Image (tube, helix red, strand yellow):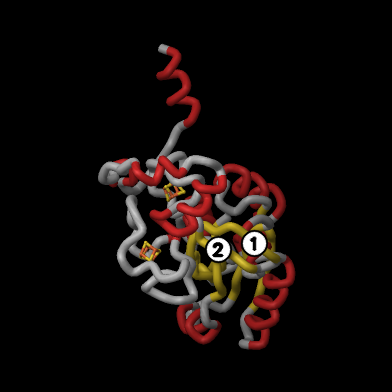
Amino acid sequence: MIITEKKDHKQLLENIKEYKSFFLIGCSECASLCGTGGEPELKEMKELLESEGKKVTGTFVAKTGCQVLGTKVELKKNFKDEVNDSECILVMSCGAGTQSAVDLYKNKPVYPTNDSLFLGNMTRLQMFDERCSLCGECILDKTGGICPVTTCPKGLLNGPCGGTNEGKCEVSSDIECAWTRIYNRLKEINRLDDMKKMTEPKNWAAHKRPMNLNVREKASAKKD
Ligand code: SF4
Ligand code: SF4
């Protein structure tokens, strides 16, 4: 899931100071789980804007904010007037959700209320860890399923480095050494020999931005 954090309210209010009326869009998925874009946060934002003398014409929590088509259908069907009556749209999801709204409302200013931080695993309620940085060429098959690209601060493909110390990383004693974890994991699953295999330098071209994928097109190309 995409982990988001609320922007500082002072900064947000400064960004939108010239507008008087707003339509608020949240997201029922990641942003709700992060506490940045579900019903309670939309209510809180509405109260904040109203306390600043602004008008909120409507609020809507999209099922999946980054799904452009689904969000468009939901908004056009149920909130056409409320959106039309607003001068500005505030999106309380991730940057992808904000850009869905930009796609849908070409002639209206759209502002994000959140910062998008990383792709995260939720380990406990509203506690998130970054475990994959979407590098485009996964090496988990070589590392016992633990990602050094993301969880080793140096992103070492072969490790550990000389700084590992009693299972901790030299960069910070708060961080477990990813390569010690990989070693322990491989030992646990009787694959310690994998530690001796060198991983070749990464093909970073596999991660050139902006990425896109058309699953149906790719599948039919494979059949041909
Ligand atoms: S190697 Fe790490 S960053 Fe790359 S895809 Fe696999 S889990 Fe994600
Ligand atoms: S100590 Fe471990 S986690 Fe830290 S940089 Fe070296 S190999 Fe990576």
Image quarter (top left, top right, bottom left or bottom right) of the N terminus: bottom right
Above or below, 223 against 186 in this view is: above
Label annotation for residue 179: none
Whichever of callouts 1 and 2 sits on the residue coming sooner in the sequence is 1
**Neighbour tally class for label 2: few under 14, some 14-19, many 20 plus, Cα within 10 Å:** some
Q: Are marks 1 and 2 in contact (CB under 8 Å)?
A: yes
Q: In the depicted view, which residue is nearer to us: 202 or 166? A: 166
Q: Residue furthest top?
A: 224
Q: Position of residue 75 (x, y in %)?
A: 65, 52
Residue 129: image tag: 2
The residue nearer to you, when weighing 218 against 202, is 202
**At x 47% / y 67%, what residue is drawn?**
167
Left or right: 122, with 152 as reference point? right
Left or right: 76 in relation to 142: right
Identify the mark at residue 123; answer none if there is no mark.
1
Report the residue at 55% width, 83% height from top. Answer: 9
